[in-house]
Amino acid sequence: MTVLVAYDGSDPAREAVEYALEEHSDDEVVLLRVVEVAGGATDAGFELLRDQLDDRRDTVSSEIAEELDDLLDTTDVDVRLETTTGDPANEIVGYADEHDIDHIIVGSYGRGGVSRVLLGSVAETVARRSAIPVTIVR
């Protein structure tokens, strides 16, 4: 089984990684970091933007490894780091669809009510759109 863990550097995301390493120690774990892209890029600036995003993606991949070094060094779990760019919820669901992922794990701040409506929730969107099981860690 392959488990995808959405990782954005936040405390809830770190807790999701810890959960995945504990609960899925016999499975392959993919840590996915999505670099958000602001909308409104023009065609003229698209190539420049693409080059900058490629550079940022490489930087983010090494940052993930550094941030989680203590967790990843103490485990025998097969962990792979991946980075993509775009809207986080769309990229998480799309990556899972395209890469034969069996389960998604996302962290959440656990906001509710008006706060969730105003701010949106990547975890909630992933849970609604995903065709595979999603675990939300709070």
Image (cartoon, rainbow, N blue to C red):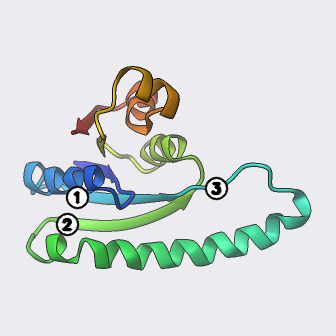
- 78 to 129, vertically: above or below: below
At x 35%, y 46%, the residue is 101
Instruction: Return the disc, 2 or 1, that comes first in the chain's sequence.
Output: 1
Q: Say whether marks 2 and 1 touch (CB < 8 Å).
A: yes
Please rate how many residues cluster around mark 3, counting C-alpha atoms within 10 Å: few if below 14, some from 14 to 19, many from 20.
few
Residue at mark 2 to residue at mark 1: CA–CA distance: 5 Å
Q: Which of the labelled discs sits on residue 37, or is there none?
A: 3
- 114 to 31, vertically: above or below: above
Q: What's under tag 1, amino acid-wise?
A: Glu
Q: Name the image quarter holding the C terminus.
A: top left
Q: What's under tag 2, amino acid-wise?
A: Asp
Most distant residue in the right direction: 44
Q: Which of the labelled discs sits on residue 28, or is there none?
A: 1
Which mark lies nearer to you, 2 or 3? Answer: 3
Q: Depth check: 103 or 71 in front?
A: 71
Instruction: Return the disc, 2 or 3, that comes first in the chain's sequence.
Output: 3
Q: What's under tag 3, amino acid-wise?
A: Val
**Residue 48 in picture, x, y percent from top left:** 79, 73
Instruction: Return the disc, 3 or 1, that comes first in the chain's sequence.
Output: 1
Which mark lies nearer to you, 3 or 1? Answer: 3
Q: Mark 2 — residue?
A: 78
- 98 to 18, vertically: above or below: above
- 43 to 93, vertically: above or below: below
Q: Which of the labelled discs sits on residue 56, or is there none?
A: none
Residue at mark 2 to residue at mark 3: CA–CA distance: 29 Å
